[in-house]
């Protein structure tokens, strides 16, 4: 009964939010000949994600000659991180920032495939590799059914930020309590670290108090989260980042657009992805520059240590892919596609065996 109430409560929330969106739309009728679309994001307008979103909004409105207007809802509660796909499918907003890697269910393969990117170090490579996997896997496509994806997102590779310990080899991770994303917990544990998962919003305080010794994070956090104030070292061990669908429109709303507007938004996919890459790269460089200015020691790992980490990372990714079999998902096939599509020089060639 408790589970049933929980499910009912979530669906009731979706319905109420959808009604709220409809009422908001009624309160601001569209001018004649203009299609008004709502966009929802949990981030404030100053966040790099939102700056990229605003650039896309401006592009769409200009390219459409004003026949499309997009009304953003920044810092809002329209879409949640764990149910954003369902909420968007049910019209809570027309377009939204989605987070399938945090969804509670129905996106097992999307979450796991983010660990298949070892060797895809640039964001264009990440996006191309995701599309290779998407093209090859009906199960991966099924996880985003009911949505029209308008942008795929990758990210700069991450490193290891530590308070006091200088890292010269993977053996130096022994005994360190590190905040890490879920997909790295097993790998770091194998290396003797004590990995924990906690919201990034709590990491600054945990570092300052010595609750944790470090964090797996990109360089932009030295500025955006002020990590330069509470840490002393940054090791640039290349820890891969995966790509995933990050901006989407409900399929039903997409189907109601005119063919001309659909074609314009199709062209806008490249514009949105380019804007996100630019903003993320800029934020990374600003964070790196902040680390240098604040005297953070920056060093890398040897090639042999990088190769050792890559081998552990890929072995764990393959185990995770195999484990999806219990859900009836052929994760191994997607893993094989990812590895065969990535050439030694980092170039992506789909379905290359």
Image (cartoon, helix red, strand yellow):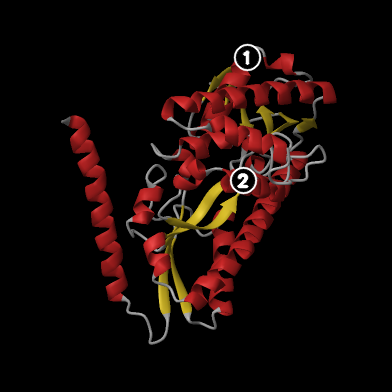
Instruction: Give residue 177's position: percent from left, percent from top.
Output: 58, 18
Residue 145 in the figure: left or right of residue 234: left
For the residue pair 124 and 353, the one nearer the viewer reads as 353
Q: Mark 2 points at which residue?
A: 130
Residue 304 versus residue 112: which sits nearer the camera? Answer: 112
In the figure, residue 208 lies in which quadrant?
A: top right
Confirm or deny contact between disc 1 and disc 2 (CB under 8 A). Answer: no
Residue 157: percent from left, percent from top: 69, 39
Q: Answer above or below: position of 28 versus 43.
A: below
- Most distant residue in the left direction: 1
Which residue in the protein does label 1 denote?
190
Please tell me which residue is depicted at 71% across the width and 20% down the height of the picture: 165
Q: Quarter holding the N terminus?
A: top left
Other residues around mark 1 within 10 Å, as few (<14) / some (14–19) / many (≥20):
few
Reply above or below: 303 against 155.
above
Give me the residue at 64% from left, 46% from top.
132
- Is residue 347 in sight in this rendering? yes
Using the image, tell me which numbered label, if any, was put on residue 326. none
Numbered-mark total: 2
Task: Report the residue at 42% width, 29% height from top.
Answer: 327
Please tell me whether mark 1 sits on a helix, a strand or a loop: helix
N-terminal label among 1 and 2: 2
Label 2: which secondary element: helix
Q: How far apart are marks 1 and 2 (CA)?
A: 27 Å
| Residue 247 image position (x, y, % from top left) | 51, 56
């Amino acid at each position: 009964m408790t589970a049933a109430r929980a499910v009912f409560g979530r669906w009731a929330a979706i319905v109420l939010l959808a009604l709220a969106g409809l009422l908001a739309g009624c309160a601001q009728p569209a001018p004649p000949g203009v299609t008004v679309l709502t966009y929802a994001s949990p981030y404030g307008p100053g966040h790099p994600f939102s700056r990229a979103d605003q650039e896309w909004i401006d592009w769409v409105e200009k390219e459409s000659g004003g026949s499309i207007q997009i009304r953003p809802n920044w810092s809002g509660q329209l879409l949640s991180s764990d149910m954003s796909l369902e909420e968007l499918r049910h019209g809570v907003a027309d377009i939204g920032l989605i987070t399938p890697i945090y969804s509670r269910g129905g996106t097992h393969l999307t979450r796991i495939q983010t660990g298949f990117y070892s060797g895809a170090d640039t964001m264009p490579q990440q996006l191309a590799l995701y599309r290779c996997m998407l093209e090859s896997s009906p199960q991966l496509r099924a996880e985003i059914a009911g949505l029209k994806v308008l942008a795929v997102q990758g990210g700069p590779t991450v490193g290891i930020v530590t308070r006091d310990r200088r890292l010269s080899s993977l053996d130096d991770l022994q005994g360190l309590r590190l905040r890490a994303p879920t997909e790295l917990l097993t790998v770091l544990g194998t290396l003797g670290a004590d990995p924990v998962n906690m919201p990034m919003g709590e990491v600054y305080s945990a570092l300052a108090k010595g609750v944790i010794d470090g964090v797996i994070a990109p360089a932009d956090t030295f500025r955006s989260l002020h990590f330069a104030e509470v840490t002393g070292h940054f090791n640039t061990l290349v820890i891969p980042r995966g790509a995933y669908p990050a901006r989407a429109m409900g399929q039903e709303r997409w189907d109601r657009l005119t063919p001309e507007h659909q074609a314009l938004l199709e062209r806008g996919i490249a514009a949105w992805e380019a804007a996100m890459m630019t903003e993320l790269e800029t934020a990374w460089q600003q964070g790196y520059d902040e680390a240098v200015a604040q005297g953070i020691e920056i060093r890398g790992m040897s090639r042999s240590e990088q190769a050792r980490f890559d081998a552990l990372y890929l072995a764990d990714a393959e185990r995770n892919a195999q484990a999806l079999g219990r859900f009836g998902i052929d994760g191994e096939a997607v893993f094989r596609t990812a590895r065969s599509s990535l050439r030694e020089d980092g170039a992506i060639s789909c379905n290359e065996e």
